[in-house]
């Protein structure tokens, strides 16, 4: 995938520039970026000449189950306090699990492969080369359609499957892969679509890094 890899490398410039800005050397003394550990681990996973093209964004819907249980616990507190206490403890545990899941969950597309890390008690780290990917599909429940998130399912050759839930930019992942395949098949229009994806990624990064105006 020489031509498609070239497009992927161009698209990765915006991501790599932001990663360099987020490097630990630019951080203020006494302050620690929560994402720094994940950035370091991701950098260690990359091989020479490999660059991150797209990175998954975990949707806040990952907290909906714990939020629902905590809300039920609050309502039960006025009627059945003992049961409310049990529900509150369960909701707090679920909230902690959701926070840890969001922190350790990793799904990225590089110019060479797809990298994924998911799970807590059994943390799986999987990578599939782009040439070995058969499809990237999306699974959505009703809440996913409403709030705009999906599970990304990457199917590789053989029986290898990666399924990562609560991805906010899931459509970008699928679009990127589809356009890369079309470029490999000689579709020139796909190159224009890749450029559009590149602009969308850079715009999203600028919005996140742009400081908020003080009133």
Image (spheres, rainbow, N blue to C red):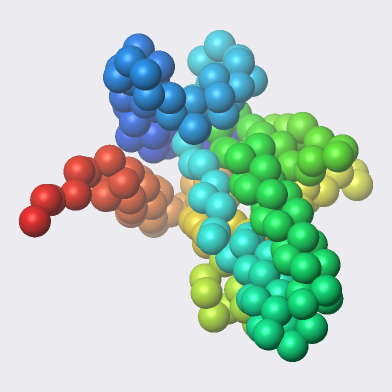
Q: Position of residue 64 (x, y in %)?
A: 63, 69
Could you tell me which residue is drawn at 31 percent across and 24 percent down? Answer: 21
- Is 29 situated left or right of 65 in this image? left
Q: Position of residue 99 (x, y in %)?
A: 63, 48
Q: Position of residue 203 (x, y in %)?
A: 28, 49
Looking at the image, can residue 119 be seen? yes
Kindly indicate the quadrant of the structure image that contains residue 15.
top left
Q: Position of residue 139 (x, y in %)?
A: 70, 68
- Above or below, 145 against 170 in this view is below
- Is 205 situated left or right of 32 in this image? left
Quarter of the image with the N terminus in it: top right
Could you tell me which residue is drawn at 59 percent across and 65 percent down? Answer: 61
- Is 34 situated left or right of 84 in this image? left
In the foreground, 133 or 201: 201
- Above or below, 170 against 29 in this view is below
Kindly indicate the quadrant of the structure image that contains residue 83.
bottom right
Looking at the image, can residue 164 be seen? no
Q: Residue furthest right?
A: 159
- Is 15 situated left or right of 82 in this image? left
Could you tell me which residue is drawn at 11 percent across and 50 percent down? Answer: 214
Q: Residue furthest left?
A: 215
Quarter of the image with the C terminus in it: bottom left
Could you tell me which residue is drawn at 77 percent across and 77 percent down? Answer: 81
Q: How many marks?
A: 0
């Amino acid at each position: 995938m020489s031509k498609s890899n070239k497009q992927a490398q161009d698209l990765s410039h915006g991501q790599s520039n932001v990663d360099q800005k987020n490097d630990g050397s630019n951080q203020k003394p006494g302050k620690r970026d929560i994402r720094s550990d994940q950035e370091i681990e991701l950098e260690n996973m990359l091989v020479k000449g490999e660059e991150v093209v797209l990175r998954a964004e975990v949707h806040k819907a990952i907290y909906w189950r714990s939020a629902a249980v905590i809300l039920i616990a609050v309502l039960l507190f006025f009627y059945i306090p003992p049961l409310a206490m049990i529900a509150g403890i369960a909701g707090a545990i679920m909230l902690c699990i959701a926070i840890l899941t969001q922190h350790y969950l990793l799904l990225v597309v590089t110019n060479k492969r797809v990298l994924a890390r998911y799970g807590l008690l059994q943390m799986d780290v999987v990578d599939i080369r782009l040439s070995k990917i058969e499809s990237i599909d999306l699974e959505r429940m009703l809440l996913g359609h409403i709030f705009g998130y999906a599970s990304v399912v990457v199917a590789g050759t053989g029986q290898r499957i990666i399924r990562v839930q609560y991805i906010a930019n899931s459509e970008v992942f699928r679009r990127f892969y589809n356009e890369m395949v079309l470029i490999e098949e000689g579709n020139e229009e796909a190159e224009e679509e890749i450029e559009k994806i590149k602009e969308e990624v850079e715009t999203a990064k600028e919005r996140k890094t742009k400081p908020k105006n003080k009133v």
